[in-house]
Image (cartoon, grey):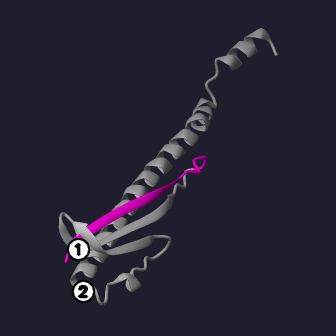
Amino acid sequence: MTLYGVARRLQSRAGTTAVEFALLALPFLLLVTGIMDASRLVWTNFSLQFAVEAAARCAAVTSTTCGPQSMTAPGAASFTYNATASCNGVAGSQVSGTMPFFFTVPGFPVSVTLNAMSCRPT
């Protein structure tokens, strides 16, 4: 190969798109996965809060059917019930819930414990 042939190959742009894609694909996929995980975290937190509020409302209205014996949560969530709680100075039913949350982003093996609490006067 002559010197002219080497110079022509160095100026060639063939394959630059593949190299750029290889450099940017992984960070882009990690960003998209991180956004989806953050959305899932917010959704799970709102769902836990809604479940705790519904349990506190049920316990305040009908404590015979929604008492501590029926405070079971689906999945890994755990609920605690306090029938003698003070809700803004008034006796009421307080329900607290905790649930672990695990991220699915590769290389980010962190878990977060979500907490929610609701108190309803009886």
Q: Is residue 55 magenta?
A: no
* Dominant SS in magenta: strand
| Location of mark 2 (residue) | 62
Q: Amino acid at mark 1?
A: Gly
Give the mark nearest the N terminus, 2 or 1.
2
* Quarter-of-image position of residue 65: bottom left
Residue shown at 43%/76% (left/top)? 73
| Location of mark 1 (residue) | 92
Residue extending farthest to the top is: 3
Give the distance between the C-alpha atoms of the residues marked 2 and 1, in whole angstroms: 12 Å
Q: Is residue 103 above or below residue 22?
A: below
Residue situated in front as seen by the camera: 82 or 41: 82
Please tell me how crowded label 1 is: few (under 14), some (14-19), or many (20+) other residues with Cα within 10 Å: many
Q: Is residue 109 magenta?
A: yes
Q: What percent of the width, then of the height, locates residue 90?
A: 17, 69
The range drawn in magenta is 106-122
Please tell me how crowded label 2 is: few (under 14), some (14-19), or many (20+) other residues with Cα within 10 Å: few
Q: What percent of the width, then of the height, locates residue 6?
A: 75, 15
Residue shown at 48%/48% (left/top)? 34
